[in-house]
Image: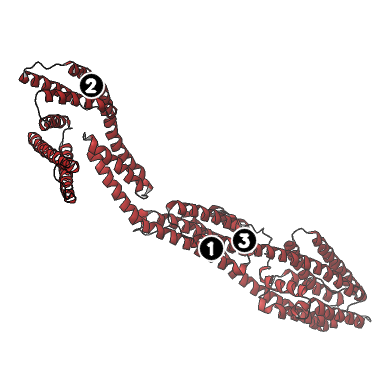
Amino acid sequence: MLEDDTNLKEVLTNETSEKEAKEKTPLNSTSPDFLNEIQRENAENAEEETLNKKREEVPMMDYEKMTLEALTKELKRLIEHEKITSIKSHIEAIKKAFDNKYSQEEDEKRELFLADEDNEEKDFYFSLPIRDEFYKAYNHYKQLKNQYQKQLEQELQTNLKRKQDIINEIKNLVSLGKDDIAWNTDTLFRKFQELKKQWYEIGAVPREYYDDIWNNFNHHTENFFDYLSLTRDFQKIDFKHNLEEKNKLIEKAEALLNEADPQKAFRELQLLHKVWKEETGPVEKEYREKLWEQFSSITKKIHDRRQAFLHQLEQIFIDNKHKKLGIISQIEEITSQERNSHSDYQKAIQQINELREEFKKIGRVPQEVSEEIWQRFVLAIRAFSKKKNLFYKENKKIHNENVSKRMELIAIAKANKDSSDWEVTTPLIQKIQEDWKKIGAIPRKLSNELWEDFRTACNHYFDRLHQERRKQNKDENSNINKKKELLDELKAFLLTGNREEDIKVLENFQEKWNHLGSLPEKLRVLETRFNKIMGVLYKKLNFDKKEIELIKYNSKLDRLPEGENALLREEIFVRKKIEDIKKNILQLENNLQFFTNIDEKHPLMREALKSIQEEKDNLVIWEEKLKELHIHESKE
């Protein structure tokens, strides 16, 4: 034994106790929070940091903004090129983004499907090949993860066994030094250093043995030093080496203060703390407190910067949460509004689609509300879709009724498009055109087709009508000139005195006049002149008023348009005229009762009796006209 063994033992014992007091404090609830946090995460990650399979930093992308194809491609890339231990959080974030995006696309397709009236009785089915491709890759990742976990468990158990063997070897060094002279101090120390090196090269052990195995190792290390009582030279060499290593760790920690990524700096700091605790030994007493305070001070700065970054990130997530909730509220507000037309719903659909795209562009929200917000968004979209689909479903019946109404009008237009009864058909076609405008909306795919059928039938009729009118106008202008010439001939005609011959001439004038057709309203004065001259001539031939009126009426009947409607309207007119005359006669006869104490010679009485007789004469004439009308109808 060397004479300074006792001092060395004291130094090593103090170093160990202080090291335990300060470097093991993360397991003590009374230590600073930033040290507790580092120690806890180191303990949790120890199982994955074995056999040089430590986690590597993999950048976290904004997966929520990626397409289904991009997410699948990134999933495959991570599985193929990155370590399984480094991509767990990435894989789960990708899966969540994929499921959300796929569900959203499925909802959109369902809306379009249900909006199509032809699909009401069909079952909705949606599937994209990209989903099978994605989950094939994801299941492959789970298989690899399970394989790695089994391998990791085996390796952790192997590491535990090897470390337990090393502890036993260190424990046996004391016995070797006592029983075998070949094991001198130098030999024992070199063997200890070799075992210590092997210890640190072995990876982690199962988490439940983490503290026990370290405490056991430290305990037998202290026992070895108690027995060994190293010389000052060995002690100084060991202290010097440990001082250099701790200063290097401090330098590395200081360099992390300049790292732009606070998250990366904190992860690197975790590794430095692990090395400080597990891979560096004690230093001389005068440096111990100073080095630890320096290392702790840097640790606090990096921890504080990370906390500030996380707080800032959390605030961004909170802002995103409020933005998304605002969009959801807008969707719910749009859904609550009442709409009664297709155009209103088209505007609302456009607004919903714009809000949906805006929602997609907003970044992440706090994890604890992420699923809740997504579900509320999905429910808001579905509520709008349900209300919209209900509107279109209820309107389908109205649309079908409108289609039937339009089909009826098309049938009327086609049935009358070749009619030549212009007076009856023209107002009919005009009426159904007005009715068409009053009919409500119909499905767009039928609207143009039905309108084209209706328009074609109506245009066909009016093209014929305009052609006929052009012809009539041409004939009418020619007939007007001929009627003027005929009127001049009539004016120049003189009765010969031969009554029968003169009547034949007048009848011939009347026949020619009738044959030339009707006159336009503005030239009806020619008709009046002709009839007046004819009346004068017939009167000269001793025709009475009734005979002259019947001649004129028969002339009118000859000029009526062909068809039952014209004769029917004329009969209605004549009968109404007869009824009106009878009413006038009755009224005049009732008025005679007011004439008291006067005889028939009184001027008023004479005037009243004259009016009654004139009305009776007119009644006879109109009754005769009705007879002539019946005769004319029988000829038809």
Q: Which residue is mark 2?
A: 479
Structural crowding at the residue carrying mark 2, measured as other residues with C-alpha within 10 Å and reported as few (<14), some (14–19) or many (≥20): some
Q: Which residue is mark 3?
A: 323
Q: Percent position (x, y) of residue 187?
A: 84, 74
Q: Amino acid at mark 3?
A: Lys
Crowding at dot 3, Cα within 10 Å, few <14 / some 14-19 / many 20+, comes out as some
Mark 1 element type: helix
Badge 2 or badge 3: first in the primary sequence: 3
In the image: residue 454, left or right of residue 251? left
Q: CA distance from mark 1 to mark 2?
A: 81 Å
Residue 147's x, y, as percent?
57, 67
Q: Is residue 99 left or right of residue 233?
A: left
327 on left or right of 193:
left
Q: Residue at x 87, y 71 (%)?
A: 291
Residue type at mark 2 is Asn
Q: Is residue 479 above or below residue 9?
A: above
Label disc, if present, on residue 377 of the rendered structure? 1
Question: Disc 2 to disc 3, how far (Cα)?
Answer: 84 Å
Viewer-nearest of discs 1 and 2: 2
Are the two marked residues, 1 and 3, in contact with CB atoms closer than 8 angstroms?
no
Judging depth in this view, the residue of 233 and 308 nearest the camera is: 308
> What whole-number distance in Å separates the C-alpha atoms at marks 1 and 3?
12 Å
Which residue extends farthest front? 597
Q: Secondary structure at mark 2?
A: helix
Q: Quadrant of residue 312?
A: bottom right
At label 1, counting other C-alpha atoms closer than 10 Å, the crowd grade (few under 14, some 14-19, many 20 or more) is: many
**Residue type beneath disc 1:** Phe
Which callout, 1 or 2, points at the residue further toward the start of the chain? 1
Which of these two is toward me, 402 or 239?
Answer: 402
Residue 72 shows up from this direction: no
Identify the image quadrant of the N terminus.
Answer: bottom right
